[in-house]
Structures are given as structure tokens and as C-alpha cells.
Image (cartoon, helix red, strand yellow):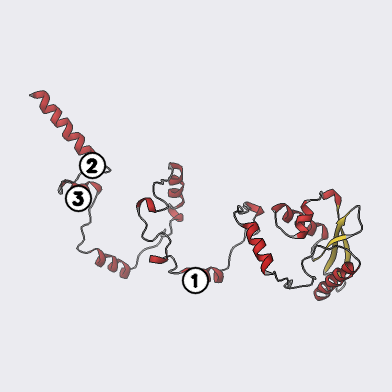
């Protein structure tokens, strides 16, 4: 039988050790020490709120977190937080809470001036990188429903004119002049080999193979690069400086001419 005396959570207050004035009131269903450690971690990450701005200015040793109240009911816990915030503010404590407390949405609505000020502060700011275990989504995975929803929303969003690089060629294309390093090529090749290949273990159906055959019917399909070189370069009198066979043929012709000159 479940013990009804087990507390659900606590109301806690944060203050400086040398002062009696509380600067923040919160609630948690975790141990207070763990919740306070989370506050310190978020403050170090650079989040900008009055409480975290104040927290960054202090040293951990100068801070004190105290349990103000406990509750055995979640709804009562939220009400207790509101009561403590109201009580301390009436007593003159300069709390840094953005809202009046309680469960659910905070109810805080920014004014247009606050939104504009936040926009100006964030303009040009480099994004915060949280790799590995520091990332709040570390080890997580989006549900199939969420991934399906995103897939449907994005379907066709990058086709034709909707693609930001549509119609861009040569120097106008963002990737113009770039080339992958050998290390990157090798890593990409290894990642797509075997089970890493999206088509690994799959076989096209008879219907799909018939469609592919119909599309290619009547189109010249060189059996090798050498065959393509003969068809599109040698037979048409074209010399492609990037074609290895064109380079080899040119070198061979040069050697033959030099040999003829020597014999003469």
C-alpha cells in the first residue's frame, strides 16, 4: 500500500549566506541540492534571466539554498510557491522570479520593448554549442509520430524554386571550388558501406526494374569509362583535359611523333 506521508516536493529559497533576504523562490520534486546544482549549470551555460544573471555574479560558497515548505500534493505545492513569493515580496525581499509562481505556464508575457531588446542582444551572438552529455537532448530520440510529422511538413519544400540554390551554377553556387579531403571521402565511404548503405539488403521489385528499363531504353549506356571516352571524345574529335584517357592518348601521340622525327 502506498505511503501517503511521502512528500511530493519542496519549496526552496536562494539567498546569500551573509544576508537574510531571499532572491529567488522555486519548487522541485527532486532533492533541493540537485535542483540547485542544475541552476548553477544553467547559469554557467549563459542563459539570460534576472536570476541567472545574479547567480553568475556570485561564488557557489557564498550562496545558500533552504527548504521553505514541503507538500504531499502537487497542486498544493504550486500554491505554496505562490504564497511564499507573495509573502516575501510583501516583506520587502527583492525576488528575481519572473512570475508569481505555481504550476503550468508562468503567464509571463513580454512587452514589445522587451522583445526588441532581446532581439538586439541576440543579434550576431554566436550559438551556444552543447556537445555530448551537456546537450539537454543527449541520448534522446524523437518519436515516430514526430518524425513523420516533420517529414510531411518538409516534403517538397526544397524542390525547384523553393530550393535556395535553384538556378545557381559555377561561382554563384555556395559549393563552387570546394572539395572534400581524402579523410572526409574515406569516412563517408566507410559510413555508407555495408549496413550503412540505405539500400543494403534491399532488392528492387520487378515493377521497379521494368520502369528503370523503360526509362533507359534507347539511351546509349557506355559499358566502361574507356567506352565512353571513345564514343564521346575520340569519335567526335573532342579532347577533354580532365579525361585521363584523353591525356593518355595525347601523350601516346606525342611519343609517336617524337619517334618518327628521330627515325627521319
| Residue at 66% across, 53% down | 134
Say which residue label 1 marks: 153
Q: Quadrant of residue 82?
A: bottom right
Expressed as whole percent of the image width and height from the top left, the position of residue 61 reads 85, 48
Task: Verify CB contact (< 8 Å) between mark 3 and mark 1.
Answer: no
Does dot 2 land on a helix, a strand or a loop? helix
Please tell me whether mark 2 or mark 1 is closer to you in this view.
Answer: 1
How packed mark 1 is, by other alpha carbons closer than 10 Å (few <14, some 14-19, many 20 or more), is few
Front in this rendered view, residue 95 or 155: 95
Label 1: which secondary element: helix
Given residues 240 and 220, the one toward you in this image is 240
Q: Is residue 52 or residue 5 the one in the foreground?
A: 52
* Residue at image mark 2: 245
How many other residues sit within 10 Å of disc 3, few (<14), some (14-19) or many (≥20)? Answer: some
Percent position (x, y) of residue 109? 70, 71
Judging by the rendered image, the residue that carries numbered circle 3 is 232
Pointer 2: residues within 10 angstroms few (<14), some, or many (20+)?
some
Amino acid at each position: 500500500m502506498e505511503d501517503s506521508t511521502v512528500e511530493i516536493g519542496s519549496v526552496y529559497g536562494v539567498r546569500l549566506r551573509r544576508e537574510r533576504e531571499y532572491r529567488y523562490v522555486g519548487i522541485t520534486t527532486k532533492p533541493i541540492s540537485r535542483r540547485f546544482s542544475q541552476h548553477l549549470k544553467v547559469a554557467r551555460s549563459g542563459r539570460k534571466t534576472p536570476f541567472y544573471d545574479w547567480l553568475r555574479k556570485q561564488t557557489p560558497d557564498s550562496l545558500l539554498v533552504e527548504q521553505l515548505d514541503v507538500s504531499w500534493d502537487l497542486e498544493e505545492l504550486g500554491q505554496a510557491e505562490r504564497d511564499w513569493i507573495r509573502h516575501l515580496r510583501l516583506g520587502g525581499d527583492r525576488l528575481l522570479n519572473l512570475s508569481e509562481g505555481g504550476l503550468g505556464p508562468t503567464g509571463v508575457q513580454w512587452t514589445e520593448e522587451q522583445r526588441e531588446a532581446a532581439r538586439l542582444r541576440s543579434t550576431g551572438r554566436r550559438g551556444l554549442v552543447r556537445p555530448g552529455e551537456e546537450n539537454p537532448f543527449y541520448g534522446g530520440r524523437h518519436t515516430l509520430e514526430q518524425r513523420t510529422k516533420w517529414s510531411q511538413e518538409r516534403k517538397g519544400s526544397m524542390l525547384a524554386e523553393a530550393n535556395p540554390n535553384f538556378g545557381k551554377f559555377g561561382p554563384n553556387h555556395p559549393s563552387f571550388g570546394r572539395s572534400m579531403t581524402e579523410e572526409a571521402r574515406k569516412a563517408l565511404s566507410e559510413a555508407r558501406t555495408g549496413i550503412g548503405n540505405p539500400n543494403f539488403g534491399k532488392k528492387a521489385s520487378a515493377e521497379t526494374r521494368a520502369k528503370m528499363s523503360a526509362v533507359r531504353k534507347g539511351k546509349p549506356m557506355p559499358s566502361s569509362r574507356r567506352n565512353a571516352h571513345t564514343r564521346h571524345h575520340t569519335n567526335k574529335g573532342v579532347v577533354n583535359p580532365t579525361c585521363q584517357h584523353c591525356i593518355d592518348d595525347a601523350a601516346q601521340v606525342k611519343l609517336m611523333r617524337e619517334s618518327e622525327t628521330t627515325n627521319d
